[in-house]
Amino acid sequence: VSGGEGARTGFGVSQPRREDRRFITGRGRFTDDLLLPGQTWAAFVRSPHAHARIQSIDIEAARAALGVIGVLTAADIEAAGLRPLPNGWDTRSIDGTPARIGVRSALATDTVRYVGEAVVAVIAETRAAARDALALVRVNYEPLPVVTTTAQAQTADAPALHPEAPDNVVFDWATGDRAATDAAFARAVHRVTLELDNSRLIPNALEPRAVNAVYDAGTREFTLHITTQNPHGKRGLISGVIGLAADTELRVLSGDVGGGFGSKAMLYPEEIVCLLAARQLGRPVKWTAERTESFHTDAHGRDHRTHVELALDADHRFLGLSIETTANLGAYASTFGTLVPTVMYALITPGQYDIPAAHARVTGVYTNTAPVDAYRGAGRPEACYLIERLVEHAARTLAVDPAVLRQRNFVRSFPHRSAFGLIYDTGDFPGLLDRALDRIDYANFPARRAESERRGRLRGIGFSCYIEIAGFGPSRLLGQLGAPSGVWESAEIRVNASGTVEVITGCHAHGQGHETTYAQVVCDRLGVPFEQVRVLHGDTGRGPAGSGTSGSRSSVGMSAVSLACDRIVEKARAIAANLLNEAPDLVAFANGRFSGVSGLTVEFGEVAAAAYAAQRFPTDMIEPGLHAVSFFDPQNFTYPAGCYVCEVEIDPDTGVSRIIDFVAVDDFGRLANPMIVHGQVQGGITQGIGQALLEGCVYAEDSGALLSASFQDYCLPRADDLPRYRIEFLQTPCPGNPLGMKGCGEAGAIGAPPAVINAITDALGVADIAMPATPERVWRALNTRQRTH
Amino acid sequence: MDNFDYHLATSVADAISLLQEVPESRLLAGGQSLLPLLRHNRARCTRLVDIAQLAELAGIQERANELVVGAGVTHAGLAASTLVRAASPALAALAGAVGDPHVRHLGTIGGAVAWNGAGADYPAALLGLATTVTTTLRVIPADVFIRADSMDDAAVNTVLERGEVITSIEFPPTLAAAYEKFPIPASRSALVGVLVARFSDHVRVSVTGAAARAFRLPDFEAALLRRFDASALGGLEVDSSGLLNDLHGGADYRAHLIGVLARRAVARCSL
């Protein structure tokens, strides 16, 4: 079905984002913009210690301070009967035992386990009064030994963070076939080994975390205004912590959201504390993180240590893959903390390659650092980094062209069942690499390298052939992998009597442009003008349920919209048949117009009016109104894939790496809005380059202090750090959803880091370099190389 | 941020008397270093005396062959001055690369010189360009102005005394000068900055960012006085002891960069 009016604004068109007018004119409505009658403000006393016993807390002076109306500690949490923040995924160790989850109270009870952990909440009449009173709270700490790295966490003398996990091991998880993998290595002609770190990142959404909690003592209902990626998920998790009789006692509202990158998908202590304070005080309680708080307490990303081995036969065909990863979960298992480094990571480690046997073992450990959870890509960047660094290393070790080695081992027929049981549905991996090689002019790279050398510079080229799993569910499969509830998406479409259309979705937007792209789907399907379609989201009290916007799930929501449109068309067709005096199955719909065999036609808008007038069709056969709801549960993951090629030039005197060229060829299936997709790729690549070159999260090993807790010390990429990317799309439609989409949200952040690091290690002639590959690290790598050559 | 009084001084003399009325009072020029610290409670004061707008501190002139820059001149003003660009292109370029546009349009040379921050660019200019700092009490040669005897005490980094206000900075003529800065990626302040200046009778090489205070490199200067060419620095190594060793760079890396940047600065002087 293709709409007439919709053709210019419909699916596949680079429709300008209707959100942008308000964003670029400062008229967005973010959580901190909301000021409620009787508003109060919260501020948090946070632990200055990475690990300490709380000996005493004295809140009397703070309680007596001018403007302070409440001070909460763990005792209030306990007295209110609140439960700990939950682990959101049933991750099982190899022996079948559940992950060992340390108790995480919304305010620390007897022990603090990372710098920045909330200990006391002060609620006051003004933001300043709340903040000033923090200095009046006296907390006596008895410092304990600190562990910050995966390497330290499992040493014999490492301090235990949680009694539930005396060896700091949260889980010892594995997937794949150990025996088959061992057999593959036994018959291998070549074996290649690599030790790799995937560096820790701090998310830094533009808009910090913010909440405004309300309790209505009359109805005994909570309302939580919050900047979140997942309003319904938040409602479910919080209802459990507070112990609400019904989740409908909590309404979660989310207005404009200024970025998330995963960090606004999980549950945080401040949300619980503000709700409790609102109930205790009978007034709305607001909290917005300061940037320093964001650095310390937003869930961090990545932080893996991995030993990986690849088995190859005499023809350089991959036979087996064996992975041992230690994942730093931080001080507590955050909501998806055990999911991200297991299912989201290990299953996709074989990448674009046909590897018959594979085994991955992941050990999650506690350390005295901020909890680690989903960050743009969430596990899949770690997987891609691992396989793409490994394959590049194998090519260099075996002295074969890295492009040739990849071509020899690509998955070429679909559907393909991977060694970890995933079913790759479609793709064209050789096509992606060929296109990228052509665009980068790979054949002439040696000449470019020689030209750089003449100028005293070192030039390197690096590939990254990434693939990810995205577009979650399917619910049944995720349930088998540990999901506690279904993962699908829903959409409700209300066609009004005036012909306007309201689309209400369960998933929310934090930069994806749903108000534009979801309307484009409707324009396409119903043939109504773009201006007449309005997309509503971010309100559990109004919209149907949803599973949150993460993992390129906007495409799943769009499929739900598409299915709901189909239902609207079917009902409208029945009404139109009455208006045209035709049999419904003889009425065609195209270009926003129903037409019968007689040649008579009726516009979609007229049908909408007739649906509500309810005078021209038998209402005992057809209900009045034009309204549909659809739930879409994908039948498989989607598999966005691509090939990135990066060329760098290094100044050996200073170690400065400059990205000379960056080619991205992505296959996201069909594109809803190429301009928005282009923007997603640009942003993703930029974050990936940030990890590869600039963003260094550093904890002091002795004290556990976060040394990189400001933009003075933690370097986000800026425009002058970056080249102009050359982005192209190759489209193999996804068979798993009605729109043929695969999703594009994480791709850049997944594909870019190995491309950059492969280019740098190529230029330097070294096996590995830690991320971020700062000028100093590059300089040290050069020094080491010179000493060993 | 704690409460403080704010006074807009009407003259330098007025500023001094306002300053001396209460303890823990401070001068406010562009505020680009002080205000962030106050905002994060990492510095405290009871009174701020604003001297940013004082006419006495404004203006750039040429006097007896020297460039005289009023303490209230902003970095952007310095960078854009045709007088400065003609007399000392290196100084104009240095000022034009301080911080970001916001900092450059509010921050002043007097404020930056008085603050004497560890990764700041002006300390290299002070030492390398053989400047004098004129205050309400005296004229101080740059080598005296920056205290090298208090490296462990960040608060006592210049010889400025309480109630002493910088009024101007004087730059004598150079034959050639160049400033090479290697920025810390996050803050864009100098991990290492090296200024090389050639005068009629001597050469100066100054370094900022690498240590708690800016300093000169006498052996580099001597080598360049014998032969002003980058190759003259070939055999010279910088001792890394005493250099900063932190999150942003090891002492040995900073020592290495000093050599690289010095050679580049000399090469640019020679162009």
Image (spheres, coloured by chain):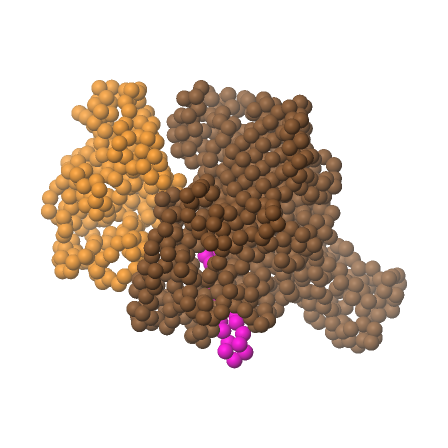
Q: Is residue A196 visible?
A: yes
Asked if A249 appears above or below A592 in the picture, the reply is below
Return the x and y of residue B180 as percentages of the image width and height.
32, 33
Q: Is residue A678 visible?
A: no
Asked if A613 appears above or below B197 in the picture, the reply is below
Asked if A1 appears above or below B186 in the picture, the reply is below
Q: Is residue B250 magenta?
A: no
Taking the view exactly as shown, the residue that stands out farthest to the left is B137
Please indicate whether residue A305 sits to the left or right of residue B257 in the image: right
**Residue drawn at point x = 60 percent, y = 46 percent:** A94
Q: Report the quarter where the N terminus of chain A lies.
A: bottom right
**Residue drawn at point x = 12 percent, y = 41 percent:** B139
**Residue drawn at point x = 31 percent, y = 53 percent:** B36
Asked if B209 appears above or below A143 in the picture, the reply is above
Please name whichever residue, A136 or A678, is drawn nearer the observer in this view of the structure. A136
The span picked out in magenta is: A205-225
Please name whichever residue, A102 or B222, is drawn nearer the observer in this view of the structure. A102
Return the x and y of residue A530 as percentages of the image width and height.
65, 59
Number of marks in the image?
A: 0
Q: Is residue A222 magenta?
A: yes
Return the x and y of residue A209 as percentages of the image width and height.
47, 58
**Residue drawn at point x = 26 percent, y = 22 percent:** B228
Please indicate whether residue A466 sits to the left or right of residue B80 in the image: right
Q: Report the quarter where the C terminus of chain A lies.
A: top left
Q: Identify the image quadrant of residue A501.
A: bottom right
Any idea which chain is the brown one in this picture? A
Q: Identify the image quadrant of residue A55.
A: bottom left
Return the x and y of residue A512 as percentages of the image width and height.
58, 53
Please name whichever residue, A437 or A710, is drawn nearer the observer in this view of the structure. A710
Any idea which chain is the orange one in this picture? B
